[in-house]
Image: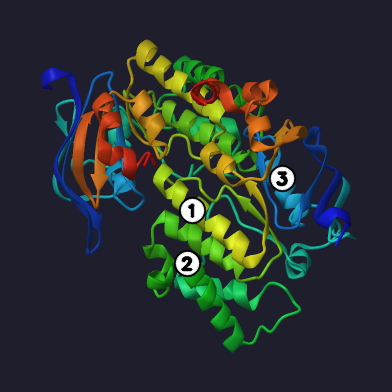
Amino acid sequence: MKDNLLLKVSNLDAGYGAIQVLWDINLEVKQKEVVCVIGANGAGKSTLLKNIVGIIPSFKGEIFYSDNNITKMASPERIKMGLGFAPEGRHLFFGLTVEDNLLMGAFQRKYDESVKEDLDFVYTLFKPLKGYRKKLSGNLSGGEQQMCAIGRALMSRPELLIIDELSLGLAPVVVDDLIDILAKLRKERGISILLVEQDVKVALDIADRGYVLEAGAVSIHDTTDKLAKNEHIKTAYLGIA
Amino acid sequence: MGENNTILKIKNLSKHFGALKAVDEVSFEVKKGEIVGLIGPNGAGKTTLTNLATGAFPKTEGKVLFKDLDISNLKPYQIARMGLTRTYQVVKPLIGMTVEENVLVGSLYGKDDRNTDMKNASKRAKEIIKLVGLENKKDSLVSDITLPDLKKMEFARVLAMEPEVVFLDEVMAGLNPTEVEEASVLVKKVRQEKDLTIVYIEHIMKAVMGISDRIIVLHHGRKIVEGTPQEVVNDPAVIEAYLGKRYAKGIKEVNNEG
């Protein structure tokens, strides 16, 4: 794809049944880029991410991933191509241990040394998980479950990591760590990241570019430096009067 | 009521899961009408403490005194009927029912010394829905409303039980800063109007700082610090274990400006 484009969403309409949620969405993620999507609750952020990973079908428009048209492709195929997804609300397998949850993230890979390496990698990123590897995931605290969900997404070795609600329920110090971890993933593994984040300050700090969704349409997209100075964003999303 | 208006007293409370001391000899008091923030790293024991206080888990040791009565061996429904209740971290709406019907469930339940016939319960549910600002959504199915509205609905459902003390477990998680601001105003308004006492668990520091009278910090199941919001956020142990460098930097900037 041109200009190191990894993901390209063009003229996407989507929704649920008769209800259209997204209107003519255009969005791009370049290689090694961190891009955030911000917007009020109900603006369509999660719906957009679910469309990109193929959990819900689109009405109209196309999605390209490194030169392939993936619009009609099933979710597992998209994951195989390099998309990784940490959904909102964690969605862990509560009856499974932490380690088995992580391994589920690699279920389409051959179980070999590289999977074990990635497990170790996730345990170095999220240290508390290592001590709980044989514990049922349902017994973890909320924040630990969030770590497990992001770790599971990493187990598919994604090129593009998609995270819905990065900091939800996490202690500030853990959010600090996660920000460092994402920077490390980009630097050391060349991973691109597309994230939805309610703490708009955090989102603007870690991303290169951002898209603002309002009532299902992109109202503004720009570099995060410029978005942080935008008056509308200050009042509507940062709570700065 | 206890001395000094103490409504809730946690005394040497512990909960062990095997070798793990999830809550380890924690003691604190909450006065009537207070909002006490409960913060701490993930896995510090905040939700477990809530589960102990509201009877969801049996304690290992210690006492929970609600209006001077030891409630630590009672069942959740008994405790709820006495006037101590909680919300859940992950919203638990009754799917397939409207906002009003969900709130009505709380209204029909709750404290046992009140009139819970359908007419009264329905009237109460309507009042609470108005108080939290969900009037125009009252007939919507809960599956059709946004997360901030779901959180309001959960709050309303608990309020409809007419509690005296409520544990709010991350009621603002998933809200953006502007939505957090609105929710904080609502919590303060409700405290005032309902003469409510609140134990408030939250990671969004702006909200915790804005509404708590006092803050208690848990770490590895133990209480490490208790104080005013200002004392707590400037405490090196709290910065190290919980707030982190980004937040500390923010405080420094504010202190320098002030």
Label 1 CA crowd tier, 10 Å (few <14, some 14–19, many 20+): many
The percent coordinates of residue B142 (x first, y second) are: 43, 66
The vertical placement of B121 against A183, above or below, is: below
Q: Say which element carries label 1.
A: helix
Q: Label 2, on which residue?
A: B95
The vertical placement of B85 against A62, above or below, is: below
Quarter in which the N terminus of chain A is drawn: top left
x 36%, y 50%: residue: A41
Give the quarter of the image for residue A186.
top left
Q: Amino acid at mark 3?
A: Thr
Q: Earlier in the sequence, mark 2 or mark 1?
A: 2
The vertical placement of A149 against A1, above or below, is: below
Q: Label 1, on which residue?
A: B183
Q: Amino acid at mark 2?
A: Ile
Give the quarter of the image for residue B67.
bottom right
The vertical placement of B176 against B251, above or below, is: below
Q: Amino acid at mark 1?
A: Ala
Label 2 CA crowd tier, 10 Å (few <14, some 14–19, many 20+): few
The percent coordinates of residue A223 (x first, y second) are: 23, 26
| Foreground residue among A149 and B148 | B148
Q: How is the image coloured?
A: rainbow
The answer to whether one can see residue A52 in this image is no
Q: Earlier in the sequence, mark 2 or mark 3?
A: 3
x 85%, y 59%: residue: B71
The percent coordinates of residue A84 (x first, y second) are: 36, 31
Cα separation between marks 1 and 3 = 24 Å
The circle drawn on residue B48 is 3
Q: Say which element carries label 2.
A: loop
Which chain letter goes with mark 2? B
Cα separation between marks 2 and 1 = 23 Å
Q: Say which element carries label 3.
A: helix
Specify whether disc 1 shares its chain with disc 3. yes
